[in-house]
Image (tube, helix red, strand yellow):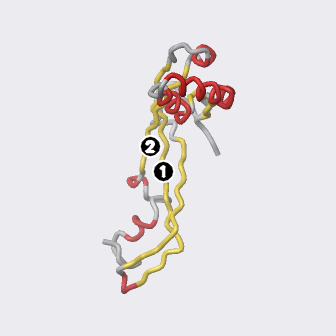
């Protein structure tokens, strides 16, 4: 339990960043479904996707502006997290420079929900959505971002 700056695990609680903290790493393994036929998918064909990954990132955190109150019963702080690409743990042949084409999940979900509406309502909404989202249905994702 961390109830003061003198607690035995205080430093580990405060941050996992810095010398001697290699055993405290937090890893995120991310997988993506890369759309292989974006033009055909926009024309109504079934999407063809390829799973890519894992892309591994180390997560580091630092708690700061730490304030104790109520005799150590309450602590408030700000927390900063940052992520560093881990090439060594990332899948073979994958790099931080890879790019993907992904559908916007909200648009795809909304399109699915349209199929549950009566045909007359579906047609009216589909035309409006198609006009609004035609150019924004897909987006490019870059694995490395600053």
Marks 1/2: CA distance?
A: 7 Å
Position of 56 compared to 23: left or right? right
* Image quarter of residue 72: bottom left
- Residue beneath label 1, please? 59
Position of 141 compared to 66: left or right? right
10 Å crowding of disc 1: few (<14), some (14-19), many (20+): some
Assign the N terminus to one quadrant of the image: bottom left
Q: Is residue 59 above or below residue 128?
A: below
Q: Is residue 41 above or below residue 125?
A: above
- Assess whether mark 2 and mark 1 are in contact (beta carbons under 8 angstroms): yes
Circle 2 — which element?
strand
In the rendering, at what x and y percent does residue 132 appear?
68, 31
Circle 1 — which element?
strand
For image coordinates 39% across by 55% down, the residue present is 24
- Residue beneath label 2, please? 28
Q: Is any part of residue 71 visible from this angle?
A: yes
For image coordinates 42% across by 50% down, the residue present is 26
First of labels 1, 2 by sequence position: 2
Residue furthest out toward the bottom: 71
In the rendering, at what x and y percent does residue 121 appear?
54, 28
């Amino acid at each position: 339990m961390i109830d003061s700056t003198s607690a035995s695990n205080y430093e580990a609680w405060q941050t996992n960043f810095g010398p001697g903290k290699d055993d405290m790493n937090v890893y995120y393994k991310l997988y993506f479904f890369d759309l292989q036929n974006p033009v055909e998918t926009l024309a109504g064909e079934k999407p063809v996707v390829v799973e890519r990954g894992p892309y591994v990132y180390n997560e580091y955190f630092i708690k700061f502006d730490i304030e104790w109150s109520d005799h150590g019963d309450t602590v408030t702080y700000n927390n900063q997290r940052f992520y560093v690409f881990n090439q060594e743990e990332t899948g073979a042949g994958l790099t931080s420079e890879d790019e993907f084409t992904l559908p916007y999940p909200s648009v795809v979900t909304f399109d699915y929900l349209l199929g549950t509406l009566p045909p007359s309502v579906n047609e009216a909404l589909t035309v409006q959505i198609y006009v609004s989202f035609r150019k924004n249905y897909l987006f490019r994702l870059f694995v490395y971002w600053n």
